[in-house]
Image (cartoon, helix red, strand yellow):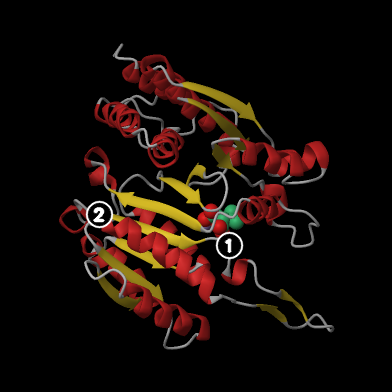
């Protein structure tokens, strides 16, 4: 197969880790006979510096013309403490989500045996946890009406959801559960929020189309406890944008990988793959960042967008070998710490069968 992949490294360590993910894909191309063409694009704080726009239309256009997008991270501390900044890197992320129609953010949570002892949760509780959070990504408070009253003393963010938006994300979750352990947990705050009541009403209706799937309903505050106390009980969690943002950060750290998990955003146009971690600007360009989440995002890309299951599994198993053999960056090293490029090289060599 011949595929075009847009590379959107972005800010901080984004370009460093994305380059290693590209290396893994190049190794796959060599052994499989597939051809991958990589198309560089810009976005985030670095694009604000270059052209004043965190998400230039040319980047959206390139992404639409490609078969998948490999994304690093957006964000720069110079914007964090400046509430008056006119343009912010995060706006670029929201724009690409909206323009590519990326309504479903798929965040798998699974444990790595070699990292389990680093989990903040007891091994007997977290061991063999394996669930997926399906987060709605283009609605809710992120995109609802927001602003201030005239006197500037009151602010508001509106949480809006249409039945159509809820239906399509629920279907994504139910279809995913059908290929897994057949359980969907709908997370909401239906005891308080009108949007949550519409979610629940819609979920009750949609669940009838999926008689093989067990559906349960959980308030978000309770779900945040259950992720810590009984993580193995979950298979697929589906929830709205803001709840999903918070729960996925929580869920990603229980595995012992300190948040180094891949994710996919899928929807109407090209899908986008990215590590859950941020831009970690202090480490940018120092060749110390952990590239594994980015490399695992490339594995997700192959499986989800190109249906290359075996090739995807090769990447995952190469990452597991690196972990098992102690080829790790300083954040998870036990003994010698390897650099970003050393870890990436090892994984690529492993894919090529040279290690
Ligand atoms: C994420 C991030 C983003 C979000 C930020 C950077 C806008 O936290 O992808 O989870 O809140 O969605
Ligand atoms: Mn987040």
Near mark 2 (Cα within 10 A), the count class, few <14, some 14-19 or many ≥20, is: some
Front residue of this view, candidates 243 and 140: 140
Which of the 4 image quarters holds residue 43?
top right
Which of the 4 image quarters holds residue 311?
top left
* Percent coordinates x, y for residue 304 in the rendering: 41, 42
- What residue is disc 2 on? 180
Asked if ligand 1 lies within 8 A of label 1, the reply is no
* Percent coordinates x, y for residue 196 in the rendering: 46, 80
C-alpha distance separating marks 1 and 2: 25 Å
Question: Which badge, 1 or 2, is on the more N-terminal residue?
Answer: 1
106 relative to 132 in the view: left or right? right
* Percent coordinates x, y for residue 19 in the rendering: 53, 26
Tell me which residue sits at (41%, 16%) in the image. Answer: 33
The quarter of the image holding the N terminus is top left
Tell me which residue sits at (61%, 50%) in the image. Answer: 100
The answer, for residue 170, to whether it is visible in the render is yes
Q: Dot 1 lies on which element?
A: loop
Tell me which residue sits at (30%, 67%) in the image. Answer: 184
- What residue is disc 1 on? 138
4 relative to 222 in the view: left or right? right
Residue at the far top: name it. 354
């Amino acid at each position: 197969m011949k595929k075009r992949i847009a590379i959107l490294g972005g800010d901080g360590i984004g370009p460093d880790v994305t380059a290693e993910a590209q290396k893994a894909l190049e190794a796959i191309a060599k052994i499989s006979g597939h051809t991958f063409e990589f198309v560089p694009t810009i976005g985030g704080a670095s694009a604000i510096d270059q052209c004043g726009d965190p998400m230039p239309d040319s980047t959206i256009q390139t992404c639409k013309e490609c078969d998948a997008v490999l994304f690093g991270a957006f964000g720069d501390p110079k914007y964090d403490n400046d509430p008056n900044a006119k343009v912010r890197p995060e706006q670029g992320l929201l724009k690409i989500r909206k323009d590519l129609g990326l309504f479903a953010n798929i965040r798998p949570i699974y444990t790595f045996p070699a990292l389990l002892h680093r989990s903040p949760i007891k091994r007997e509780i977290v061991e063999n946890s394996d669930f997926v959070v399906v987060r709605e990504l283009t609605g809710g408070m992120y995109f609802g009406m927001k602003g201030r009253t005239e006197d500037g003393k009151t602010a508001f963010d509106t949480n809006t959801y249409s039945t159509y938006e809820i239906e399509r994300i629920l279907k994504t979750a139910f279809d995913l559960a059908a290929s897994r352990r057949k359980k969907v947990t709908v997370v909401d705050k239906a005891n308080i929020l009108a949007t949550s009541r519409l979610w629940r009403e819609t979920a009750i209706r949609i669940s009838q189309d999926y008689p093989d799937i067990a559906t349960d309903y959980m308030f978000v505050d309770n779900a945040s406890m259950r992720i810590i106390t009984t993580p193995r009980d979950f298979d697929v969690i589906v929830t709205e944008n803001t709840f999903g943002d918070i729960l996925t950060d929580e869920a990603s750290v229980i595995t012992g990988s300190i948040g180094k998990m891949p994710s996919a955003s899928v929807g109407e146009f090209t899908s986008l793959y990215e590590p859950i971690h941020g831009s970690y600007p202090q480490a940018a360009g120092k060749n110390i960042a952990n590239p594994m989440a980015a490399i695992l995002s490339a594995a997700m890309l192959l499986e989800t967008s190109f249906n290359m299951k075996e090739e995807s599994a090769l990447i995952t198993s190469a990452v597991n070998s690196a972990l098992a053999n102690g080829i790790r960056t300083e954040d998870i090293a036990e003994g010698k710490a390897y650099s970003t490029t050393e870890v990436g090289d090892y994984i690529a060599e492993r894919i090529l069968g040279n290690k």
